[in-house]
Image: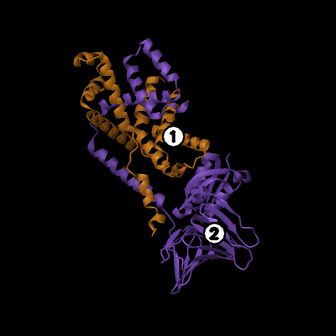
């Protein structure tokens, strides 16, 4: 019932009633009509208040007409300055230059620092996005394209080249693609592989057993001594890969997991003091480099208490 | 506190900031429809108040109310439209705007209202001016212009609707978008 009328339709009706009510003050028939209209939807009270406020505002306009120009201009200038400051504050980012080392003519090493996210074209038309605190070696050969993910996480958009297979190695895990896009995150000897386009093949070096094919929209955890099972999760994949644009998207993750995610990117670590709070689920979209906003949002929506210390942001139960 | 006083207070302390609240909600990623709903709900809560004497800063109160409503909606729907929450720090800056500037800013809005009245379609403008600026009763305007009282009423409603819409529309100055464009992560792309 609530959605039978849109907010703006109600606003339009309310302006009519505001004018009518004024003209018909003391007319019992019209007052009854107005009361009936108001009773029809609880939102109408607010809309009527707004429309009547506008009439009242316009009446004040008579007295205040012809505001002094110079002061208005000065205020406008101050506004612009504040706007610039506001934007600047939102942009404060630790943007340390990523290390690039040329190991040989075809071999390069890329490192990213804490909180750094970097996109690098690989020269063959492929693109790699490297997440926080990661390291990878790229070797572009005549017969193959090899990437070794030594630490961390990277997403690859691979240019098609059937003569030169594109293989990512991380620990004992191998992921092979022809023309596709996927990410690999190293977790010790295991790797999380997410496929955003095409198909990849995964296997564990030195282990027997078939290779597992993973299609777009699926993810898989590959590692020695664990069965490789791919899970379809197309909507989750885009969310998990939001780090590529410097964001963390949470959709019902526990606060403990969310804090771990922020702590991958920031020197200021989030600590959750209350075990119950750590298990609470949270939804939100944040910047990887802005754990403060996350803490504020948790404080607001969950009534948590935030304590800011040098190097730490502590979240606890509210008083 | 009488209803009339509350209406006057809302007209002076809340309504002039509606465009800013809408822009802020828009920047936070709320859809146009969500913004309409949130703003309307905020006025509903104001309408339910017995008085406004306890509200020191209408602008801050409006932002605060809109934010609470937004958060309640997020919690209810669990939709990932919580981008707004990340703007909380920005909101605090908005709130702490010095009051003299607020007064000047609202005067600027008033000057704009005059412009808006001047910008109404001719017949609508004449009637609206007689009614609102000169405070002439509807019946007298009808007699003066040789039209029915109903026409005067309709034109006044139309004028109010047009002005209210222009006054409170979210400013599409792309402020939020610009911030995103300048995001260093994206800047480094390619």
Callout 2 crowding tier (Cα within 10 Å): few <14, some 14–19, many ≥20: many
Q: Which numbered marker is on residue A185?
A: 2
Q: According to the colouring, which chain is purple? A: A
Q: Which mark is residue B66?
A: 1
Residues at badges 2 and 1 in contact (C-beta under 8 Å)?
A: no
Chain at tag 2: A
The residue lying furthest to the top in this view is: A28
How would you rate the neighbour count of disc 1 (Cα within 10 Å): few for under 14, some for 14-19, many for 20 or more?
many
Calculate the distance from the C-alpha at mark 2 to the C-alpha at mark 1. Answer: 40 Å
Q: Residue furthest bottom?
A: A104
Mark 1 element type? helix
A106 up-or-down from A67: above or below: below
> Of circles 2 and 1, which is in front?
2
Residue B7 in picture, x, y percent from top left: 43, 27
Residue A156 coordinates in the image, percent (x, y): 55, 70
Q: How is the image coloured?
A: by chain
**Residue B62 falls left or right of residue B105:** right
Image quadrant where residue A24 sits: top left
């Amino acid at each position: 019932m609530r959605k039978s009328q849109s907010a703006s339709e109600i606003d339009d009706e309310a302006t009519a009633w505001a004018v009518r009510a004024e003209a018909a003050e003391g007319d019992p028939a019209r007052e009854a009509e107005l009361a009936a209209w108001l009773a029809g939807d609880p939102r109408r009270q607010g809309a009527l208040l707004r429309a009547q406020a506008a009439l009242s505002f316009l009446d004040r306009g008579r007295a205040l007409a012809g505001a002094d120009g110079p002061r208005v201009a000065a205020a406008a200038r101050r506004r612009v300055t504040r706007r610039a400051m506001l934007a600047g504050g939102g942009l404060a980012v630790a943007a340390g230059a990523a290390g690039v080392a040329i190991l040989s003519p075809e071999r390069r090493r890329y490192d990213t620092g804490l909180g750094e996210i970097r996109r690098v074209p690989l020269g063959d038309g492929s693109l790699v996005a490297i997440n926080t605190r990661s390291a990878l070696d790229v070797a572009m050969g005549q017969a193959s394209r090899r990437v070794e993910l030594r630490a961390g996480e990277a997403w690859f958009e691979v240019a098609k080249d059937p003569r030169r297979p594109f293989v990512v190695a991380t620990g004992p895990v191998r992921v092979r693609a022809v023309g596709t896009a996927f990410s690999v995150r190293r977790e010790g000897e295991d790797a999380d592989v997410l496929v955003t386009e095409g198909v990849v093949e995964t296997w564990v070096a030195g282990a027997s057993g078939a290779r597992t094919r993973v299609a777009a929209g699926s993810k898989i955890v590959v590692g020695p001594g664990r069965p490789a099972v791919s899970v379809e999760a197309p909507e989750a994949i885009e969310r998990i890969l939001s780090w590529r644009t410097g964001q963390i998207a949470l959709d019902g993750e526990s606060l403990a997991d969310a804090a771990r995610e922020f702590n991958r990117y920031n020197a200021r670590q989030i600590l959750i003091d209350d075990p119950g709070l750590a298990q609470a689920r949270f939804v939100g979209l944040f910047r990887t480099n802005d754990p403060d906003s996350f803490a504020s949002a948790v404080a607001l929506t969950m009534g948590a208490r935030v304590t800011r210390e040098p190097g730490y942001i502590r979240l606890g139960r509210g008083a | 506190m009488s209803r009339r006083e509350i209406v006057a207070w809302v007209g002076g302390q809340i309504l002039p900031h509606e465009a800013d609240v809408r822009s802020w909600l828009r920047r936070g990623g709320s859809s146009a429809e969500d913004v309409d709903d949130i703003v309307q709900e905020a006025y509903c809560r104001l309408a339910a108040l017995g008085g406004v004497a306890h509200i020191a800063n209408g602008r801050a109160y409006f932002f605060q109310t809109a934010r609470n409503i937004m958060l309640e909606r997020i919690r209810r729907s669990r939709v990932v439209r919580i981008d707004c929450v990340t703007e909380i720090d920005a909101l605090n800056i908005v709130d702490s705007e010095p009051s003299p500037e607020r007064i000047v800013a609202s005067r600027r809005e008033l000057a704009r209202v005059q412009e808006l009245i001047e910008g109404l379609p001719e017949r609508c403008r004449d009637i609206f001016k007689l009614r609102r600026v000169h405070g002439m009763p509807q019946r007298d305007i009808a007699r003066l212009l040789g039209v029915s009282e109903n026409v005067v009423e309709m034109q006044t409603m139309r004028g109010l609707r047009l002005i209210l819409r222009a006054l409170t529309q979210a400013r599409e100055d792309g402020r939020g978008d610009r911030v995103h464009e300048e995001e260093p992560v994206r800047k480094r792309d390619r």
